[in-house]
Amino acid sequence: MNDFPITHGLSAIRSLLLKKWHCCAGAASLLAVTFFAPQGMAQTQQILFDDFNYSNNTQLSNNGWRVRTWAGGPGLANGSWSANNISFVTDPALPSNKFMRLKAGTNINGNNIANNNSTTGSVSQAEVARVEQIYKNGTWAARMYFNDAPSTGPDGDTVIQTFFGLTDYIEGAEPYSEIDFEYLPNGGWWTGSATPSMWSGTYRIVDWSDESNHGVTRTQGSLQGWHTLVMQVTDGHIAFYIDGAYQTSFSGAVAPDYPMYLMFQLWFSNDCFDAACNTRGYLKNSNYREYYEDVDWVYFEKDNLVPPSEVPQKVASLRASGINYVQNINNNSSSSSSSSAAAQQCNWWGTLYAICTHINSGWGWQNNADCVGIQTCATLSPPYGVVTAGSSSSAASSSAAFSRLIQAEAYTAMSGVQLDITTDTGGGQYVGWIETGDWMSYANINFPSSGTYKVEYRVASPSGASLSLDLNAGVTQLGQVAIPATGGWQNWTTVSHTVSITAGTHSLGIYAPASGWNINWLRITKL
């Protein structure tokens, strides 16, 4: 169980919730990719594939991956996570190939931990996650290298090497789903554990006290080396395979029922399931030790249970076709499309969006684009709101003055911020945890003509703050806007300013010259 595993304990979970009770996962726009299906693969298949043939984290982020940098659980409440723990190493057996390497290191002595916080020493861990929360039914697969011993320093910590899926976290409640491959090379978590073991599990909610909330199988034995991990998910069922061999499966209420982020982690645990656990957490040693895991590739195919033996063949076919990365997955189930919704659009203050087929309220993401829930769209008065595709209202909107609404969480790159669920009109997510120097950028924003534009920002701030707008990584500064004190993190108001912009496609940036504010969306309108 990852990111918020039951094994982390409530103290670790609460340490995350204390940060303005924000959640710590998000979704963002994806880099547009043209996918030419290799021979033998139907173009209708919806897949995520990445062989991690990168040179740096910027390239990784540009293809829709988020590298964690904020502190907190899983593990110690004051544990850290660093982008420096992600690197890309050349495959010694095939120099044209690269692996994504996650590393984690610590010098914490297990005797120096109190209330799930280290009192002396430090720990630095690694997490990489997709920015879109759309993964559920289908085939989840990754080829990973596990290590039974640290690359440096003494051995013996409870270290967790993982491939998993997870939703935004809600403590002890739905909607929540989590599915995990968790390899513990030194054992841990249970009475008498001292041998390597793989935990294969699924969690309905994070409440270990109720066995009906989860299903877990612990398989003992070393997995040092390369392995292909496969999870097959359908409604009400999940099955786990390693190197084509069946491991375990679970059915019923514990099976995942909500879309998840696809993720990898490497972290240290200080938890046990019972008081008699004799392999607990951190080694009683203050010398530095470091572990790593490698990921060769990841593959997800929506709504199709690929036989585990065929997954490597599909990956080989993609690579043979020169494809290093593709993501062409819709955010709605192929079985839940609606012809009536497809015939309708949302005229959102002059900009047309699709009507979401998977939600009725709030904003969503499907077919690699923003969509609006029909109930949310219906709150706008004519000529805006729900319109029929091809109608006069729809046509009028397309020829009207340019206006574009951008959800704040739809950034293509960012530094320092996190996401949570908003109570603002329309629902959805907002960007928070904004500190001085943080930023978000939104690539490929097209401004149809040169001139003056009004830019509005939906913001909240207990004490007031400011933000600034720029183009193309700060090359063109467009000015600052004062954010008034709204009295709370969820008390929303709209502020605006006018700016002059040259026609063309730009990268739009929001920068935080001051901390202490949240943003839900921004709207750009040609004056």
Image: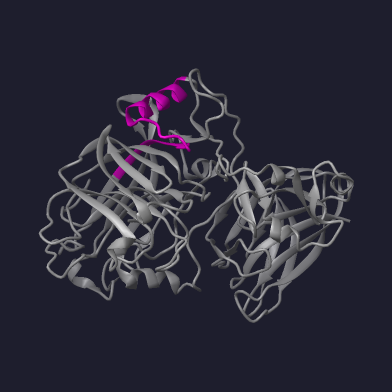
Left or right of residue 454, residue 210 in this image: left
Q: Position of residue 349 (x, y in %)?
A: 81, 57
Q: Position of residue 350 (x, y in %)?
A: 83, 53
Q: Camera-side residue: 331 or 109?
A: 331
Q: Position of residue 177 (x, y in %)?
A: 42, 56
- The magenta segment is 293-320
Left or right of residue 454, residue 114 in this image: left
Residue 318 is covered by the magenta coloring: yes
> Visible in this render: residue 122?
no
81, above or below 22, in the image: above
Q: Position of residue 261 (x, y in %)?
A: 46, 50
> Visible in this render: residue 188?
yes
42, above or below 294, in the image: above
Q: Quadrant of the N terminus?
A: bottom left
92, above or below 166, in the image: above
Q: Quadrant of the C terminus?
A: bottom right
Left or right of residue 502, residue 415 in this image: left
Identify the residue at image location x=47%, y=41%: 56
Asked where in the image residue 43 lies, by quadrant, the reply is: top right
Identify the residue at image location x=22%, y=45%: 151
Q: Camera-side residue: 219 or 487?
A: 219
Residue 301 is covered by the magenta coloring: yes
Identify the residue at image location x=59%, y=34%: 33
